[in-house]
Image (cartoon, rainbow, N blue to C red):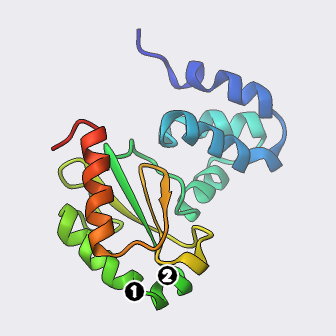
């Protein structure tokens, strides 16, 4: 049986209903559960929190963190904040794009997406990346290649 958006959302809506200030916690919980925030959920979320659909949509699209489509099988996030940039982060972005075939913040390629993130809290250990949510610091091209190969192998990809 395919669940409807309302059945999927019901526990979260019940927990946060009527409290507009809990939009962000609700969206985080939904994305943690589903991997993304389905645009079909926006009307139900807006109604439950007494917000307009535009307000909910605006928050989802304002924050880079929220996805509106299911994530790729392998998600690489590269920190592009100042500390990582000063320690080779942009060269690492170019290497990650060449290695994965995916363009940063673009469409996934062969089950891999590459996303920008602005600070992973590892400024003293930059550049930093996450691969499928696992944080790695002091990542250079060779280390990225090894981490990426491990992630793909664990995920059942070649």
**Closer to the camera, 62 or 78?**
78
Question: Disc count in the image?
Answer: 2
Asked if 26 appears above or below 7 in the picture, the reply is below
Question: Quarter holding the C terminus?
Answer: top left
Q: CA distance from mark 2 to mark 1?
A: 6 Å
- Per the rendering, the mark at residue 88 is 1
**Closer to the camera, 102 or 76?**
76
- Per the rendering, the mark at residue 138 is none
List x then y, in percent, for residue 2. 41, 14
Asked if 17 appears above or below 90 in the picture, the reply is above
List x then y, in percent, for residue 106. 30, 64
Quarter where residue 122 is shown: bottom right
List x then y, in percent, for residue 1. 41, 8
Would residue 124 be found to the left or right of residue 67 on screen? right
- Helix, strand or loop for disc 1: loop
Q: On the image, numbered disc 2 is attached to which residue?
A: 84
**Closer to the camera, 3 or 115?**
115
**Residue at 20% across, 55% down:** 109
């Amino acid at each position: 049986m395919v669940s409807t958006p309302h059945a999927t959302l019901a526990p979260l809506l019940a927990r946060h209903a009527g409290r507009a200030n809990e939009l962000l916690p609700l969206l985080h919980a939904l994305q943690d559960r589903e991997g993304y925030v389905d645009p079909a959920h926006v009307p139900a979320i807006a109604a439950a929190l007494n917000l307009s659909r535009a307000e909910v949509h605006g928050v989802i699209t304002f924050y880079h963190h929220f996805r509106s489509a299911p994530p790729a099988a392998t998600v690489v996030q590269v920190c592009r904040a100042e500390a990582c940039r000063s320690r080779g982060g942009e060269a690492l972005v170019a290497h990650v794009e060449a290695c994965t075939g995916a363009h940063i913040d673009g469409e996934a390629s062969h089950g891999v997406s590459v996303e920008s993130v602005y600070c992973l809290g590892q400024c003293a250990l930059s550049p930093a990346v996450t691969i499928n949510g696992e944080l790695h610091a002091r990542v250079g091209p060779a280390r990225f290649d090894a981490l990426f190969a491990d992630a793909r192998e664990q995920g059942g990809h070649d």
